[in-house]
Structure formats: structure tokens, C-alpha cells
Image (spheres, rainbow, N blue to C red):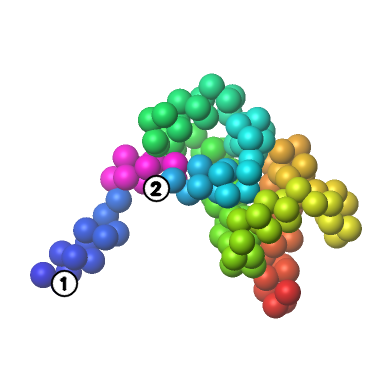
Amino acid sequence: MGAELVKSKTDFSPEREAKAVYKAIFTFKDDARLTYEDLSKILSKDTATLKRWNKDKLIPLKDKHLREAISNFIAIFRSLAAMFSDKGDRALWLKTPHPDLHGSPLDMMTESFQGLLHVRAYLDYVRGRGA
């Protein structure tokens, strides 16, 4: 019986995975007070697609680039959640220019995929050194 319980918790169907990713992405969007336009630039998808995903409450994960962008976006959210318990502080951090980043993290994330990777690497570094 114990093995069955473990299997059911780790056995994700593509639909369950798509729903879990939807929840993470749109929770971060709302927590960080991001617009559909911000999210559109970060994930390289048009706003109509994002609104459809929000309506359907799932994100199809067939596109490799999308999976990579989502993975990094969620990692940024998790890092910010670990650093700041308050949603407002997470939103403020994303929108405030940082000398180490030469601008705001949100601007970097919306400018390019490389910017998204840079913000994630910066947060990994800051969290790793105990800041």
C-alpha cells in the first residue's frame, strides 16, 4: 500500500503537469503584480495565448524553449519567495533597479531570454552566499 501511495504522488500525467505549471506561473504573475505584457515578453508568447491558458487553467508544455523559460521563471519565483515573505516585497524587488544588475530585474527578464537567465543566476548567487 505504501508503494502505491508514493507512485500516485509522483505519477504526473501531462495534463496534471500542465495544470501545476499554470498554477505556479499565474500565482507568480499575480504575486509580483506582473502584467500579461510582462509575462508575454518573458515567455515569448502573445497575450491572447496567455489569456487562453489562464481561461483553460493549464499551460501546454510541448515547446522546448517555453519549458526552459518556465523553469527559469519558476526558479526566480521560488528564490524570491525564500528571500521575501511579503508579496509586495517580491514585486518591489523585481521592479527596482539594482546596481549589480545595471537595471531592474523585470526589465532584464522582459528584454531577452538571456536576461531571464541572468536574473536567475544572480538570485542563485545571492542566495548561495547567504544574503
- Tell me residue 98's x, y (percent): 84, 56
Relative to 62, residue 80 above or below: below
Q: Nearer the viewer, residue 23 or 15?
A: 23
What is the quadrant of residue 128 in the picture? bottom right
Give the residue drawn at x 39%, y 47%.
Answer: 20
Q: Is residue 52 magenta?
A: no
- Tell me residue 90's x, y (percent): 66, 56
Kindly tell me whether residue 117 is visible in this rendering: no
The earlier-in-sequence mark between 2 and 1 is 1
- Tell me residue 129's x, y (percent): 72, 76
Give the class, few, some or many, for how many residues have Cα within 10 Å of label 1's Cα (few <14, many ≥20): few
The reply, left or right, for residue 66 in relation to residue 123 is left
What is the quadrant of residue 87 in the picture? bottom right
Between label 2 and label 1, give the one nearer the viewer. Answer: 2
State the mark number for residue 2.
1
* Dominant SS type (magenta): helix
**Label pair 2/1, CB-CB below 8 angstroms:** no
Give the class, few, some or many, for how many residues have Cα within 10 Å of label 2's Cα (few <14, many ≥20): some
Numbered disc 2: secondary structure: helix
